[in-house]
Image (cartoon, helix red, strand yellow):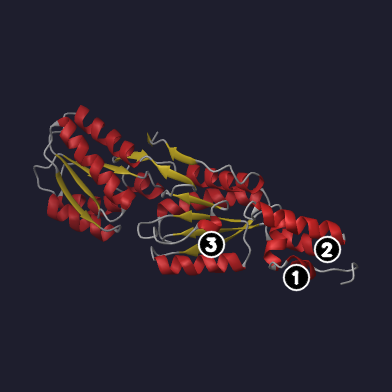
Amino acid sequence: MKRKNLTLKDIAALCGVGKSTVSLVINKSPKVKQATREHVEAVIREYGYTPSLTARALRSQREKIIGIIMTRLDSAAENRAIRAILASAYQQGYDAILQESLLNPQLLEEHLRVLESRRVEGIILFGFSGMETISLEQWQHRLVMIASQRPGFASITYDDQGAVALLMEQLHASGKKSVSFIGVEEGDLTTGRARYQAYLACCQQYGLRPQALLGDLSYQSGYALAEKLLTPESEALVCATDTLALGAMKLIKERGLDIDVASIGSTPLMTFLHPEVTSVRLGFEAAGKTALEMLLAMQTDPTAIRQTVLPCSFTA
């Protein structure tokens, strides 16, 4: 084979590997085995191959794109995080492809294939229960999870237990002896199980009788659960999310109940409509900003994988 004007395809044929492997070696990807890397680099040196500057420039432009996979477009919490991601990404010259998993593992897999074909630099993935069976190994150094964890992967999670503990501590300190709870089914490991189990632990700590019902993540569920659970004797209600609290507040206002309500989320809609509700902030904006920082850090240092738990706090 002539040594002039060799293409990426030619080098791949000489090495006995695919074009993508040669490309990964040229771009210093950590995903290539050391022996393969050394073999490809030796062939490149032997034949004096130099990648096309034009092609590399075009590739660089394409790679200034990240993927964002959220669970639901109507999630107020995720939208707050995404606004922070996009603001920071645009400032650094990145664009984004936004997709919605709808809590469906099969749909998530399709989105991952699309993002791979678009050659995005990395992905920020809002996790959900049920995605545990999906293989993500090829994305290990190019993916950050929000609200979910997996060993060996970068992640940002919220302090779900701490948020419930803050609310229960304040209600207990104010003398409340009857504190009810409405939440999400335990199949949801974070918003559901973690917050419900934290409520039960606080009830045991303070000597309270648990009074709880679980449903789905909707205003209607919040209303229906409150309707079943609350009585004129109820003193306080803790809601696992602001969405549930907004539904519960509709019922409480209609019935004229005198109940202290506390919620997790501190969304603008909640604080605007019901400033009397005690609210805990989880740090959605901080999650978005931190997720992008972590993703870009891994571009230069693939070993920069860390797991971060954001602290919660009362709304100022």
Disc 3 is placed on an element classified as strand
Residue 308's disc is none
Tell me the amino acid under the disc marked 2. Answer: Ser
Q: Nearer the viewer, mark 3 or mark 1?
A: 1
Q: Nearer the viewer, mark 3 or mark 2?
A: 2
Q: Which callout, 3 or 1, points at the residue further toward the start of the chain?
A: 1
Q: Classify residue 216 by image quadrant.
A: bottom left
Horizontal and vertical percent for residue 39? 74, 57
Q: Is residue 280 left or right of residue 228?
A: right
Horizontal and vertical percent for residue 299? 64, 49
The residue that mark 1 highlights is 13
Tell me the amino acid under the disc marked 3. Answer: Leu
Q: Which callout, 3 or 2, points at the residue further toward the start of the chain?
A: 2
Disc 2 is placed on an element classified as loop
Q: Classify residue 301 by image quadrant.
A: top right
Disc 1 is placed on an element classified as helix
Q: Write the residue at 58% across / 48% down.
A: 295
Horizontal and vertical percent for residue 170? 25, 31
The residue that mark 2 highlights is 52
Q: Write the residue at 20% across / 45% down.
A: 181
Can residue 159 be seen in this snapshot? yes
Nearer to us in this view, 1 or 290: 1
Q: In which quadrant is the C terminus drawn?
A: top left
The residue that mark 3 highlights is 98
